[in-house]
Amino acid sequence: MAHLDVTDLTPPQPRRQFLCTFGALAGTAALAPLAGCEVSDLHTPKPAAGLTLNFDVASNDFKALAVVGGKAKVALGGQDILLVRASKTEVFAMTNACAHQACPLDSVGNWSEKDGVLTCGCHSAKFSKDGKIVAQPINGGTIAKPPQTFKVTFDGTKGTVTT
C-alpha cells in the first residue's frame, strides 16, 4: 500500500479538495464514498479563450456529426470538447467530461432530439444544449456547476467552435 505523507502537500488543501483529488487518483472504487465531489473540484483545465476550430461533417474526423445525435470529441486549447449534432441545423459544444464524476460524454452521452437533453450514461445526469442541469445523477450525487459550453456556428455541413 502506498504511503501518502500529507505534510508534503504544498500549498495545504482544504479537506474536501484533498479527499476529492485523492479519491479520483485512487480509482473508480474509491469514488463511491465521494459522490459529492464534482469535476470542478478536480480542477479541470479550461481552454484558452479566443481559440477557433473549424469543422466539416464531410471530414472523417467529424463524420459522426452528419446525423442528428452524432457526437465528435475535439481537443481545443488543452481541453476535450464534445460536439453534438442537436438537429439538422444545429451543433452545440460543451466540455466532454460530465460535471458529476467526469465520465467521457463522447462515449457514454446520448442526445435526445425529442427531449432536448444530453444524458450521461454513467449516472443519468441530464444537460440541455446550453449546459443547464436538467436532472441530477440517479446515484444520489449532486452537480452544482453545469458543464462549460462554447459558441458554435453551423450551416448544416460546416461550422466553427470558439472558446
Image (spheres, rainbow, N blue to C red):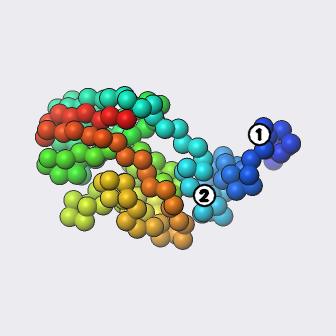
Q: Residues within 10 Å of mark 1 (few under 14, many from 20)?
A: few
Task: Please tell me whether mark 2 sits on a helix, a strand or a loop.
Answer: loop
Residue drawn where x is 17% and y is 33% of the image: 158
Label of residue 11 in the image: 1
Q: Position of residue 114 (x, y in %)?
A: 20, 64
Residue 106, visible in the rendered structure: no
Residue 11 is left or right of residue 70, and the answer is right
Image quarter of the C terminus? top left
Residue drawn where x is 60% and y is 51% of the image: 41
Residue 138 is left or right of residue 57, and the answer is right
Q: Nearer the viewer, mark 2 or mark 1?
A: 1
Would you place residue 9 above or below residue 69 in this image? above
Task: Out of 2 and 160, give the one closest to the viewer.
Answer: 160
Label of residue 91 in the image: none
Residue drawn where x is 49% and y is 56% of the image: 145
Q: Position of residue 82 (x, y in %)?
A: 36, 43
Label of residue 37 in the image: 2
Q: Quadrant of residue 133?
A: bottom left
Q: Residues within 10 Å of mark 2 (few under 14, many from 20)?
A: many
Residue drawn where x is 18% and y is 39% of the image: 154
Task: Please tell me whether mark 1 sits on a helix, a strand or a loop.
Answer: loop
Q: Amino acid at mark 1?
A: Pro
Residue 12 is left or right of residue 99, and the answer is right
- How far is the residue under mark 2 from the one under mark 1? 20 Å
Q: Amino acid at mark 2?
A: Cys
First of labels 2, 1 by sequence position: 1
Q: Position of residue 72 (x, y in %)?
A: 31, 40
Would you place residue 92 above or below residue 10 in this image? below
Q: Quadrant of residue 65?
A: top left
Task: Out of 28 and 16, give the one closest to the viewer.
Answer: 16
Residue 63 is left or right of residue 2, and the answer is left
Q: Position of residue 75 (x, y in %)?
A: 40, 32
